[in-house]
Image (cartoon, rainbow, N blue to C red):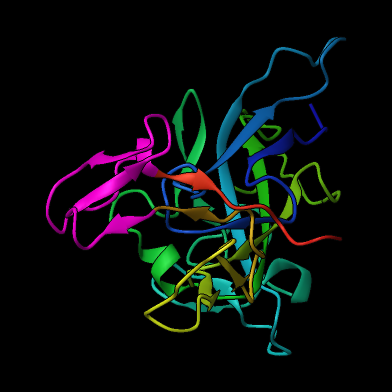
């Protein structure tokens, strides 16, 4: 067996923005690895271990790969050690269905070190169980993945840690004799604005407006708006 395994990055989705809100977050880097060749006399070997490398893309310094506590390791593409090299840019993954490495899960150390608005390259590589001529299995004897293809075993993620901002432009004052519509603006410097939702609270009624009944009958004094009180805002014309 002289052929290296092949890996795939499952998560992150390539070039996707990730934030800290559940459903839009990245708990773990996920990967899959398969040993090769799939057929022939040398088929049937197994993947020994998988690793991931996370590279900070927005800096000219080559030593910007995650080292476990900071982005302080020389990246493989910049002259660092190959897949699985000890104390290097390659971080060992855990096999739990898929090969897994924590980003926001657990202590969330990697996520905390990531910079808002920046892009990071994620690679996954693996080693097999190939032995040397004497039958001994070691780091040297194992076939290592050294080739990386965009959107296969190499993907990028973008970090968005800042919430959007909104501004009510109409009404512009507290007292109004009539009001045809409420309008405003919304902006986000990172991933952009996905949607805007609106809810109306009656200071006199001390309840939220219920669009289903047309009454101020939702929630309680100074409560957060219930889902039933929230309606979609109409986006501005393209």
| Vertical arrangement, residue 21 with respect to residue 64, above or below | above
Choose between 165 and 129: the one closer to the eye.
165
Outermost bottom residue: 60
The residue drawn where x is 29% and y is 42% is 226
19 vs 106: above or below? below
Q: Quadrant of residue 7?
A: top right
**Residue 224 belongs to the span the image colors magenta:** yes
Left or right: residue 210 compared with residue 82: left
Percent x, y of residue 102: 42, 49
Q: What are the residue bounds of the magenta stretch? A: 200-229
Q: Is residue 122 above or below residue 70?
A: above
Would residue 194 be visible to someone looking at this image?
yes
Tell whether 121 sits left or right of 207.
right
Is residue 130 among what the camera can see? no
Residue, x 22% and y 63% (percent of image)?
203
Q: Percent position (x, y) of residue 117? A: 61, 75
Q: Quadrant of the N terminus?
A: top right
Residue 42 horizontal/vertical position (percent): 80, 16
């Amino acid at each position: 067996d002289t052929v290296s395994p092949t890996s795939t990055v499952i998560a992150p989705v390539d070039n996707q923005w990730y934030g800290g809100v559940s459903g839009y977050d990245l708990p773990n880097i996920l990967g899959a690895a398969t040993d090769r060749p799939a057929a022939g006399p040398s088929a049937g070997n197994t993947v020994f271990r998988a690793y991931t490398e996370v590279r900070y893309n927005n800096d000219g310094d080559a030593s910007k790969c995650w080292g476990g506590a900071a982005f302080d390791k020389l990246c493989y593409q910049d002259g660092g050690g190959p897949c699985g090299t000890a104390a290097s840019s390659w971080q060992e993954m855990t096999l739990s269905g898929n090969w897994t490495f924590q980003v926001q899960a657990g202590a969330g150390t990697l996520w905390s070190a990531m910079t808002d608005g920046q892009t990071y390259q994620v690679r996954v590589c693996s080693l097999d169980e190939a032995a040397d001529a004497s039958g001994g299995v070691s780091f040297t004897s194992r076939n290592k993945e050294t080739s990386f293809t965009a959107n296969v075993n190499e993907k990028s993620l973008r970090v968005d840690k800042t919430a959007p901002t909104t501004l009510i432009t109409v009404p512009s004052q507290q007292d109004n004799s009539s009001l045809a519509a409420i309008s405003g603006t919304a902006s986000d410097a990172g991933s952009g604005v996905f949607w805007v939702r609106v809810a109306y609270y009656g200071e006199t009624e001390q309840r939220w407006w219920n669009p289903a009944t047309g009454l101020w009958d939702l929630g309680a004094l100074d409560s957060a708006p219930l889902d039933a009180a929230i309606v979609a805002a109409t986006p501005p014309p393209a």
